[in-house]
Amino acid sequence: MNRFRVTVSALAALTMIGTVVAVSPVTAVPQDVDRAGSTKTDFWFKHDAYGTKVSGNDLVASGPTAYSYLGCTQRAGVSHSNDIADAGVPALVQADGVKSEGWTDEKDGVTSVTSRNTIAGGSLAGGRITFEAISVRATAYNDGAFRTKGSAKIVGLTIDNEEITLGDGSHQQFEVPGLGVLHVNQKFRSRSSDHSQLRVVALRLVSYLEGTTIRVAHARAKIADEGASGPFGGQAYASQVRLAGGAANSGKTGLQPMGCVGTNGKVKENSTVEGIQSTDQVELEGASSKAWSQRSTLEGWTESKIARASLGGGLVTVEAIKARAFADRNGDRVVRSAKGTTLGSLSVGGTTYSADDLLALDQPLEVPGVATITFKKVERTNNSIKATALEVLLLPGTDLESKVELGVARMKVKKD
Protein backbone atom coordinates (compact mmCIF):
# COMPACT_ATOMS: atom_id res chain seq x y z
CA MET A 1 0.00 0.00 0.00
CA ASN A 2 1.29 3.43 -0.89
CA ARG A 3 1.22 6.55 1.16
CA PHE A 4 1.82 10.26 1.06
CA ARG A 5 2.40 11.94 4.40
CA VAL A 6 3.18 15.63 4.80
CA THR A 7 4.70 16.34 8.19
CA VAL A 8 5.78 19.57 9.81
CA SER A 9 8.46 17.81 11.86
CA ALA A 10 10.07 16.08 8.89
CA LEU A 11 10.05 19.23 6.83
CA ALA A 12 11.63 21.30 9.56
CA ALA A 13 14.23 18.69 10.51
CA LEU A 14 15.67 18.22 7.03
CA THR A 15 19.15 19.80 7.05
CA MET A 16 22.60 19.26 5.65
CA ILE A 17 23.48 15.58 6.02
CA GLY A 18 27.05 14.36 6.27
CA THR A 19 30.05 15.80 4.47
CA VAL A 20 29.43 14.10 1.15
CA VAL A 21 25.82 14.87 0.28
CA ALA A 22 24.30 18.30 0.77
CA VAL A 23 20.53 17.96 1.10
CA SER A 24 18.72 21.26 1.10
CA PRO A 25 15.84 21.94 3.49
CA VAL A 26 12.39 21.47 1.99
CA THR A 27 11.13 25.02 2.13
CA ALA A 28 9.77 25.83 -1.30
CA VAL A 29 6.46 25.01 -2.83
CA PRO A 30 6.81 23.75 -6.39
CA GLN A 31 6.91 26.46 -8.96
CA ASP A 32 7.33 27.14 -12.62
CA VAL A 33 9.60 30.18 -12.81
CA ASP A 34 10.32 32.22 -15.92
CA ARG A 35 12.71 34.61 -14.23
CA ALA A 36 12.94 38.24 -15.24
CA GLY A 37 15.62 38.50 -17.85
CA SER A 38 15.26 34.91 -19.09
CA THR A 39 16.41 34.58 -22.67
CA LYS A 40 15.55 32.48 -25.69
CA THR A 41 18.36 30.18 -26.79
CA ASP A 42 19.10 28.13 -29.91
CA PHE A 43 18.38 24.89 -28.01
CA TRP A 44 15.48 22.93 -26.54
CA PHE A 45 15.50 21.69 -22.95
CA LYS A 46 13.92 18.86 -20.99
CA HIS A 47 14.23 17.83 -17.35
CA ASP A 48 12.46 15.39 -15.07
CA ALA A 49 13.29 14.18 -11.58
CA TYR A 50 11.59 12.23 -8.81
CA GLY A 51 12.25 10.54 -5.50
CA THR A 52 10.70 7.07 -5.76
CA LYS A 53 8.83 4.97 -8.29
CA VAL A 54 7.54 1.39 -8.17
CA SER A 55 6.67 -0.40 -11.42
CA GLY A 56 6.13 -3.85 -12.88
CA ASN A 57 3.40 -4.94 -10.47
CA ASP A 58 -0.05 -3.37 -10.64
CA LEU A 59 -0.85 -4.37 -7.05
CA VAL A 60 1.87 -2.16 -5.60
CA ALA A 61 2.61 0.26 -8.44
CA SER A 62 3.36 3.82 -7.42
CA GLY A 63 3.96 6.74 -9.72
CA PRO A 64 6.88 9.15 -9.30
CA THR A 65 6.93 11.05 -6.00
CA ALA A 66 8.03 14.68 -5.66
CA TYR A 67 7.87 14.74 -9.44
CA SER A 68 9.40 17.74 -11.19
CA TYR A 69 9.13 18.28 -14.94
CA LEU A 70 10.30 20.91 -17.40
CA GLY A 71 9.89 20.78 -21.16
CA CYS A 72 8.66 22.56 -24.27
CA THR A 73 11.01 25.48 -23.72
CA GLN A 74 14.00 27.11 -25.37
CA ARG A 75 14.47 29.67 -22.60
CA ALA A 76 17.42 29.89 -20.25
CA GLY A 77 16.45 31.08 -16.79
CA VAL A 78 13.50 28.75 -16.26
CA SER A 79 13.17 26.41 -13.27
CA HIS A 80 10.76 23.98 -11.64
CA SER A 81 10.84 22.30 -8.23
CA ASN A 82 8.69 19.98 -6.15
CA ASP A 83 9.04 18.36 -2.75
CA ILE A 84 7.40 16.09 -0.23
CA ALA A 85 8.39 15.16 3.31
CA ASP A 86 7.45 11.49 3.37
CA ALA A 87 6.49 9.11 0.58
CA GLY A 88 6.65 5.45 -0.27
CA VAL A 89 5.01 2.05 -0.44
CA PRO A 90 5.11 0.33 2.97
CA ALA A 91 7.32 -2.78 3.00
CA LEU A 92 8.78 -1.77 -0.38
CA VAL A 93 10.27 1.73 -0.25
CA GLN A 94 10.25 4.68 2.12
CA ALA A 95 11.85 8.07 1.47
CA ASP A 96 12.00 11.11 3.72
CA GLY A 97 12.60 14.73 2.79
CA VAL A 98 12.40 14.36 -0.98
CA LYS A 99 13.09 17.32 -3.24
CA SER A 100 13.32 17.46 -7.05
CA GLU A 101 14.32 20.44 -9.14
CA GLY A 102 15.52 21.44 -12.57
CA TRP A 103 16.72 24.61 -14.26
CA THR A 104 18.13 25.99 -17.49
CA ASP A 105 21.06 28.36 -17.84
CA GLU A 106 23.23 30.15 -20.38
CA LYS A 107 26.52 31.63 -19.24
CA ASP A 108 30.02 32.17 -20.64
CA GLY A 109 29.24 30.38 -23.88
CA VAL A 110 27.73 27.32 -22.19
CA THR A 111 24.01 26.51 -22.48
CA SER A 112 22.74 23.87 -20.08
CA VAL A 113 19.84 22.14 -18.35
CA THR A 114 20.32 20.53 -14.94
CA SER A 115 18.12 18.05 -13.08
CA ARG A 116 18.56 17.15 -9.41
CA ASN A 117 16.92 15.02 -6.72
CA THR A 118 17.82 14.81 -3.04
CA ILE A 119 16.50 12.52 -0.30
CA ALA A 120 17.24 12.90 3.41
CA GLY A 121 17.05 9.18 4.17
CA GLY A 122 15.04 6.05 3.64
CA SER A 123 14.82 2.31 3.16
CA LEU A 124 13.80 -0.46 0.77
CA ALA A 125 12.35 -3.93 1.30
CA GLY A 126 11.10 -3.29 4.81
CA GLY A 127 14.48 -2.05 6.03
CA ARG A 128 16.73 -4.71 4.49
CA ILE A 129 18.29 -1.88 2.47
CA THR A 130 18.77 1.51 4.12
CA PHE A 131 20.49 4.79 3.33
CA GLU A 132 21.12 8.02 5.22
CA ALA A 133 21.07 10.48 2.31
CA ILE A 134 21.14 10.57 -1.48
CA SER A 135 21.80 13.26 -4.06
CA VAL A 136 21.71 12.74 -7.83
CA ARG A 137 22.43 15.32 -10.49
CA ALA A 138 22.35 15.25 -14.30
CA THR A 139 23.43 18.07 -16.61
CA ALA A 140 23.19 18.19 -20.39
CA TYR A 141 24.96 21.12 -22.02
CA ASN A 142 26.42 22.60 -25.17
CA ASP A 143 29.74 24.47 -25.19
CA GLY A 144 30.24 24.12 -28.92
CA ALA A 145 29.46 20.40 -28.76
CA PHE A 146 26.78 18.42 -26.95
CA ARG A 147 27.99 16.90 -23.67
CA THR A 148 26.76 15.57 -20.31
CA LYS A 149 27.95 15.28 -16.75
CA GLY A 150 26.37 13.87 -13.63
CA SER A 151 26.78 12.15 -10.30
CA ALA A 152 25.06 10.05 -7.67
CA LYS A 153 26.20 10.41 -4.06
CA ILE A 154 24.91 7.97 -1.46
CA VAL A 155 25.65 8.14 2.27
CA GLY A 156 25.30 5.24 4.69
CA LEU A 157 24.10 2.49 2.37
CA THR A 158 23.48 -0.82 4.15
CA ILE A 159 22.20 -4.23 3.02
CA ASP A 160 20.96 -6.57 5.76
CA ASN A 161 22.66 -4.33 8.36
CA GLU A 162 26.02 -4.55 6.63
CA GLU A 163 27.53 -1.25 5.52
CA ILE A 164 28.33 -1.16 1.82
CA THR A 165 31.53 0.46 0.63
CA LEU A 166 30.93 2.21 -2.67
CA GLY A 167 33.58 2.78 -5.28
CA ASP A 168 34.52 5.70 -7.47
CA GLY A 169 31.00 6.52 -8.62
CA SER A 170 30.74 3.88 -11.33
CA HIS A 171 27.87 1.44 -11.58
CA GLN A 172 27.85 -1.37 -9.03
CA GLN A 173 25.37 -4.15 -8.33
CA PHE A 174 24.76 -6.26 -5.25
CA GLU A 175 22.84 -9.49 -4.75
CA VAL A 176 20.25 -9.26 -1.98
CA PRO A 177 19.57 -12.89 -0.99
CA GLY A 178 16.02 -14.00 -1.69
CA LEU A 179 15.02 -10.52 -2.82
CA GLY A 180 16.72 -9.39 -6.01
CA VAL A 181 19.57 -7.34 -7.43
CA LEU A 182 20.36 -3.81 -6.26
CA HIS A 183 21.92 -1.54 -8.89
CA VAL A 184 23.79 1.49 -7.54
CA ASN A 185 24.72 4.63 -9.45
CA GLN A 186 23.41 3.86 -12.92
CA LYS A 187 23.95 6.38 -15.70
CA PHE A 188 22.30 6.20 -19.10
CA ARG A 189 23.82 8.53 -21.71
CA SER A 190 22.82 9.47 -25.23
CA ARG A 191 24.87 11.84 -27.37
CA SER A 192 24.99 12.81 -31.05
CA SER A 193 25.62 15.83 -33.24
CA ASP A 194 22.16 17.22 -32.43
CA HIS A 195 21.57 16.38 -28.76
CA SER A 196 22.86 15.04 -25.46
CA GLN A 197 20.94 13.37 -22.64
CA LEU A 198 21.84 11.90 -19.26
CA ARG A 199 19.70 9.94 -16.84
CA VAL A 200 21.05 9.12 -13.37
CA VAL A 201 19.40 6.64 -10.96
CA ALA A 202 20.95 6.27 -7.50
CA LEU A 203 19.28 2.96 -6.53
CA ARG A 204 17.34 0.48 -8.65
CA LEU A 205 16.14 -2.73 -7.03
CA VAL A 206 15.03 -5.41 -9.48
CA SER A 207 13.07 -7.87 -7.38
CA TYR A 208 12.75 -11.58 -8.03
CA LEU A 209 9.17 -11.29 -6.86
CA GLU A 210 6.49 -10.65 -9.50
CA GLY A 211 8.74 -8.43 -11.64
CA THR A 212 8.69 -5.44 -9.30
CA THR A 213 11.28 -2.70 -9.91
CA ILE A 214 11.90 0.05 -7.35
CA ARG A 215 13.76 3.22 -8.32
CA VAL A 216 15.09 5.72 -5.80
CA ALA A 217 16.45 9.18 -6.73
CA HIS A 218 16.11 9.78 -10.47
CA ALA A 219 17.29 12.79 -12.51
CA ARG A 220 17.28 13.30 -16.27
CA ALA A 221 18.42 16.22 -18.41
CA LYS A 222 18.32 16.69 -22.19
CA ILE A 223 19.41 19.47 -24.55
CA ALA A 224 18.81 19.33 -28.30
CA ASP A 225 18.82 21.33 -31.52
CA GLU A 226 15.15 20.49 -32.07
CA GLY A 227 12.31 20.06 -29.62
CA ALA A 228 8.60 19.84 -29.13
CA SER A 229 6.05 22.62 -29.06
CA GLY A 230 2.30 22.51 -28.90
CA PRO A 231 -0.93 24.12 -27.71
CA PHE A 232 -1.50 22.33 -24.42
CA GLY A 233 -0.64 23.06 -20.81
CA GLY A 234 -1.80 22.26 -17.32
CA GLN A 235 -1.47 19.66 -14.62
CA ALA A 236 -3.31 17.70 -11.97
CA TYR A 237 -2.18 16.93 -8.44
CA ALA A 238 -3.62 15.56 -5.22
CA SER A 239 -2.45 18.10 -2.66
CA GLN A 240 -0.25 21.04 -1.83
CA VAL A 241 0.46 22.54 1.60
CA ARG A 242 1.72 25.99 2.50
CA LEU A 243 2.43 26.89 6.11
CA ALA A 244 2.42 30.40 7.54
CA GLY A 245 5.67 32.26 7.04
CA GLY A 246 6.92 29.71 4.53
CA ALA A 247 8.83 27.84 7.26
CA ALA A 248 7.78 24.46 5.91
CA ASN A 249 5.77 23.62 2.85
CA SER A 250 4.93 20.54 0.87
CA GLY A 251 4.90 20.35 -2.87
CA LYS A 252 2.44 18.82 -5.27
CA THR A 253 1.75 15.19 -4.47
CA GLY A 254 0.76 12.82 -7.26
CA LEU A 255 1.67 15.38 -9.91
CA GLN A 256 0.71 14.58 -13.51
CA PRO A 257 1.69 17.34 -15.97
CA MET A 258 0.06 18.02 -19.32
CA GLY A 259 2.91 18.44 -21.78
CA CYS A 260 2.66 20.97 -24.58
CA VAL A 261 2.29 18.32 -27.28
CA GLY A 262 -0.48 16.59 -25.33
CA THR A 263 -1.06 12.87 -24.87
CA ASN A 264 -2.16 11.87 -28.40
CA GLY A 265 -5.47 10.50 -27.17
CA LYS A 266 -3.93 8.40 -24.39
CA VAL A 267 -4.55 8.78 -20.67
CA LYS A 268 -1.37 9.58 -18.72
CA GLU A 269 -1.57 8.74 -15.03
CA ASN A 270 0.41 9.15 -11.82
CA SER A 271 -1.32 6.93 -9.29
CA THR A 272 -0.72 5.43 -5.88
CA VAL A 273 -2.19 2.45 -4.06
CA GLU A 274 -4.54 3.13 -1.18
CA GLY A 275 -2.89 2.95 2.23
CA ILE A 276 -3.33 3.86 5.90
CA GLN A 277 -1.02 6.40 7.46
CA SER A 278 -0.08 7.53 10.93
CA THR A 279 -1.62 10.71 12.34
CA ASP A 280 0.08 13.90 11.14
CA GLN A 281 -0.63 17.18 9.40
CA VAL A 282 -1.86 15.86 6.07
CA GLU A 283 -2.49 12.23 5.13
CA LEU A 284 -3.75 10.99 1.79
CA GLU A 285 -5.03 7.59 0.77
CA GLY A 286 -5.56 6.40 -2.77
CA ALA A 287 -4.37 9.45 -4.73
CA SER A 288 -4.23 9.54 -8.52
CA SER A 289 -3.91 12.21 -11.21
CA LYS A 290 -4.60 11.88 -14.93
CA ALA A 291 -4.23 13.88 -18.14
CA TRP A 292 -5.72 13.38 -21.62
CA SER A 293 -5.72 15.44 -24.79
CA GLN A 294 -6.20 15.19 -28.53
CA ARG A 295 -4.32 17.60 -30.74
CA SER A 296 -6.47 17.04 -33.84
CA THR A 297 -9.52 18.36 -31.98
CA LEU A 298 -7.69 20.76 -29.61
CA GLU A 299 -9.36 19.41 -26.49
CA GLY A 300 -8.18 17.90 -23.25
CA TRP A 301 -8.80 17.33 -19.58
CA THR A 302 -6.91 16.80 -16.34
CA GLU A 303 -8.24 15.07 -13.24
CA SER A 304 -7.19 14.38 -9.67
CA LYS A 305 -8.77 11.98 -7.18
CA ILE A 306 -8.22 11.20 -3.50
CA ALA A 307 -10.03 8.35 -1.76
CA ARG A 308 -9.59 9.91 1.68
CA ALA A 309 -7.77 12.85 3.23
CA SER A 310 -7.16 13.73 6.87
CA LEU A 311 -5.89 17.12 8.05
CA GLY A 312 -4.58 18.13 11.45
CA GLY A 313 -4.79 14.66 12.96
CA GLY A 314 -8.42 14.22 11.97
CA LEU A 315 -9.52 17.80 12.59
CA VAL A 316 -10.80 17.76 9.01
CA THR A 317 -11.54 14.56 7.08
CA VAL A 318 -12.73 14.32 3.49
CA GLU A 319 -13.91 11.33 1.46
CA ALA A 320 -13.99 10.79 -2.31
CA ILE A 321 -12.38 14.00 -3.57
CA LYS A 322 -12.34 14.68 -7.30
CA ALA A 323 -11.22 17.68 -9.35
CA ARG A 324 -11.64 17.83 -13.12
CA ALA A 325 -10.80 20.55 -15.66
CA PHE A 326 -11.81 20.39 -19.32
CA ALA A 327 -10.98 22.73 -22.21
CA ASP A 328 -11.95 22.56 -25.89
CA ARG A 329 -10.78 25.12 -28.44
CA ASN A 330 -12.72 25.96 -31.60
CA GLY A 331 -10.99 28.85 -33.33
CA ASP A 332 -10.87 31.79 -30.92
CA ARG A 333 -13.47 30.24 -28.63
CA VAL A 334 -12.48 27.97 -25.74
CA VAL A 335 -15.10 26.02 -23.85
CA ARG A 336 -13.95 25.49 -20.25
CA SER A 337 -15.65 23.35 -17.65
CA ALA A 338 -15.09 22.08 -14.10
CA LYS A 339 -17.99 19.63 -14.32
CA GLY A 340 -17.24 16.52 -12.31
CA THR A 341 -15.42 18.37 -9.51
CA THR A 342 -16.99 17.03 -6.34
CA LEU A 343 -16.53 15.19 -3.04
CA GLY A 344 -18.32 12.48 -1.11
CA SER A 345 -18.33 14.01 2.37
CA LEU A 346 -16.54 16.55 4.54
CA SER A 347 -16.38 16.20 8.32
CA VAL A 348 -15.19 19.11 10.47
CA GLY A 349 -16.12 20.40 13.92
CA GLY A 350 -18.38 17.43 14.57
CA THR A 351 -20.53 18.06 11.49
CA THR A 352 -20.58 16.16 8.19
CA TYR A 353 -21.40 17.91 4.92
CA SER A 354 -22.15 16.57 1.46
CA ALA A 355 -21.18 18.27 -1.79
CA ASP A 356 -24.75 19.57 -2.15
CA ASP A 357 -24.62 21.00 1.40
CA LEU A 358 -21.46 22.93 0.59
CA LEU A 359 -22.81 24.22 -2.73
CA ALA A 360 -25.99 25.38 -1.01
CA LEU A 361 -23.92 27.62 1.30
CA ASP A 362 -22.84 29.66 -1.74
CA GLN A 363 -19.83 30.87 0.26
CA PRO A 364 -16.83 29.41 2.11
CA LEU A 365 -17.65 27.30 5.17
CA GLU A 366 -16.44 29.04 8.34
CA VAL A 367 -15.57 26.87 11.34
CA PRO A 368 -14.59 29.37 14.08
CA GLY A 369 -11.09 28.77 15.43
CA VAL A 370 -10.59 25.80 13.12
CA ALA A 371 -10.76 26.46 9.41
CA THR A 372 -12.21 28.29 6.44
CA ILE A 373 -13.12 25.81 3.72
CA THR A 374 -13.88 26.58 0.07
CA PHE A 375 -15.45 23.86 -2.06
CA LYS A 376 -15.14 23.74 -5.85
CA LYS A 377 -13.02 26.81 -6.40
CA VAL A 378 -12.87 27.55 -10.13
CA GLU A 379 -10.49 30.02 -11.81
CA ARG A 380 -10.63 30.86 -15.52
CA THR A 381 -8.53 32.69 -18.09
CA ASN A 382 -9.23 33.15 -21.79
CA ASN A 383 -7.70 29.77 -22.66
CA SER A 384 -7.48 27.83 -19.38
CA ILE A 385 -9.39 26.64 -16.34
CA LYS A 386 -8.29 25.52 -12.88
CA ALA A 387 -10.55 23.54 -10.54
CA THR A 388 -9.70 23.04 -6.87
CA ALA A 389 -12.01 20.54 -5.19
CA LEU A 390 -11.25 21.78 -1.68
CA GLU A 391 -9.18 24.67 -0.33
CA VAL A 392 -8.72 24.60 3.43
CA LEU A 393 -7.31 27.47 5.49
CA LEU A 394 -6.53 25.93 8.88
CA LEU A 395 -6.72 28.28 11.88
CA PRO A 396 -7.10 31.42 9.76
CA GLY A 397 -5.64 34.56 11.25
CA THR A 398 -3.20 32.80 13.58
CA ASP A 399 0.53 32.06 13.45
CA LEU A 400 -0.33 28.43 12.67
CA GLU A 401 -2.34 29.28 9.59
CA SER A 402 -1.77 26.89 6.71
CA LYS A 403 -3.32 26.57 3.27
CA VAL A 404 -4.09 23.11 1.98
CA GLU A 405 -5.30 22.33 -1.53
CA LEU A 406 -6.97 18.95 -2.05
CA GLY A 407 -7.70 17.80 -5.58
CA VAL A 408 -6.45 20.27 -8.19
CA ALA A 409 -6.81 20.11 -11.99
CA ARG A 410 -5.76 22.71 -14.55
CA MET A 411 -6.17 22.56 -18.33
CA LYS A 412 -4.99 25.00 -21.00
CA VAL A 413 -5.44 25.00 -24.79
CA LYS A 414 -3.76 27.69 -26.89
CA LYS A 415 -3.96 28.20 -30.60
CA ASP A 416 -1.93 25.60 -32.45
Image (cartoon, grey):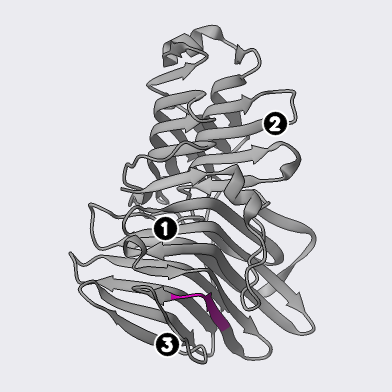
Tell which circle, 2 or 1, labels the residue nearer the N-terminal end.
1
Q: Mark 1 points at which residue?
A: 94
Q: Main secondary structure of the magenta part?
A: strand
Can you name the residue that lies furthest to the front here? 161
Report, in whole angstroms, how far the alpha carbon at label 3 lies from the one at label 1: 23 Å
The mark found on residue 72 in the picture is none
Report, in whole angstroms, how far the alpha carbon at label 2 lies from the one at label 1: 28 Å
Q: Mark 3 points at which residue?
A: 171
Report, in whole angstroms, how far the alpha carbon at label 2 lies from the one at label 3: 46 Å
Q: Do the residues labelled 2 and 1 touch (CB within 8 Å)?
A: no
Is any atom of residue 61 visible in this view?
A: yes
Under mark 3, the amino acid is: His
Q: Name the residue under label 2.
A: 400
Identify the element where label 2 is drawn: loop
Q: Give neighbour class at mark 2: few <14, some 14-19, many 20+ (Cα, 10 Å).
A: few
Tell which circle, 3 or 1, labels the residue nearer the N-terminal end.
1
In the image: residue 174, left or right of residue 16: left
Residue 156, relative to residue 292: is it above or below? below
Under mark 2, the amino acid is: Leu
Can you name the residue that lies furthest to the top here? 360
Q: Measuring 47% from the left and 85% from the top, which residue is drawn there?
A: 189
In the image: residue 373, left or right of residue 297: right
Identify the element where label 3 is drawn: loop
Q: In which quarter of the image is residue 24?
A: bottom right
Q: Nearer the viewer, mark 2 or mark 3?
A: 2
Q: Nearer the viewer, mark 3 or mark 1?
A: 1
Q: Does the magenta stretch include residue 35?
A: no
Part of the protein shown in magenta: 150-157
Q: Measuring 38% from the left and 55% from the top, which residue is drawn there?
A: 63
